[in-house]
């Protein structure tokens, strides 16, 4: 399967209301792998993906990541930098409201 992992999980779980091909566990494992990369990047870059403040990279990632994590039931305990970043970004006026329906 060459589909992006999070996109395929989103499509099957939220849109089709079915398990993704190969089972949900494979998508959870791959999303956890992605979350580790994200967590490492956020630690290396003082809590942001690019630069030293909120920018288009963060906005481009937040909604899709939030939906992926929620639809797969992933807990962010192992990814504290991601959890902190998600909270900071969604607490920004207008951001949280715009993705709450995602």
Image (spheres, rainbow, N blue to C red):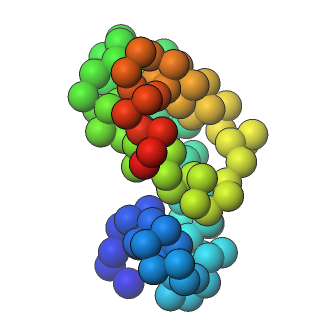
Percent across and percent down for residue 66 are: 50, 45
- Whether 62 is drawn above or below 68: the answer is above
Q: Which residue lies furthest to the right in this view?
A: 77
Q: Can residue 68 be seen in this view?
A: yes
Quarter that holds the N terminus: bottom left
Residue at 57%, 25% in the rendered image: 87
Q: Which residue lies furthest to the top in this view?
A: 52
Q: Can residue 45 be seen in this view?
A: no
User: In the image shown, does 101 or 43 lie closer to the viewer?
Assistant: 101
Percent across and percent down for residue 10 are: 45, 66
Residue at 33%, 75% in the rendered image: 3
User: In the image shown, does 81 or 102 lie closer to the viewer?
Assistant: 102
Percent across and percent down for residue 70 are: 60, 53
- Whether 75 is drawn above or below 2: the answer is above
Question: How many labels were placed on the picture?
Answer: 0
User: In the image shown, does 77 or 94 lie closer to the viewer?
Assistant: 94
Q: Residue furthest left?
A: 56
- Whether 85 is drawn above or below 72: the answer is above
> In the rendered view, does 68 fall on the left or right side of 64?
right
Residue at 32%, 32% in the rendered image: 59
């Amino acid at each position: 399967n060459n589909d992006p992992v999070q996109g395929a999980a989103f499509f099957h779980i939220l849109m089709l209301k079915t398990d993704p091909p190969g089972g949900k566990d494979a998508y959870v494992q791959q999303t956890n792998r992605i979350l580790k990369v994200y967590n490492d990047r956020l630690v290396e870059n003082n809590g942001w993906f690019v630069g030293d403040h909120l920018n288009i990279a963060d906005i481009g990632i937040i909604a899709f990541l939030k939906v992926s994590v929620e639809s797969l039931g992933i807990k962010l305990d192992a990814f504290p930098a991601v959890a902190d970043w998600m909270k900071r970004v969604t607490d920004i006026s207008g951001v949280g409201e715009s993705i709450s329906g995602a």
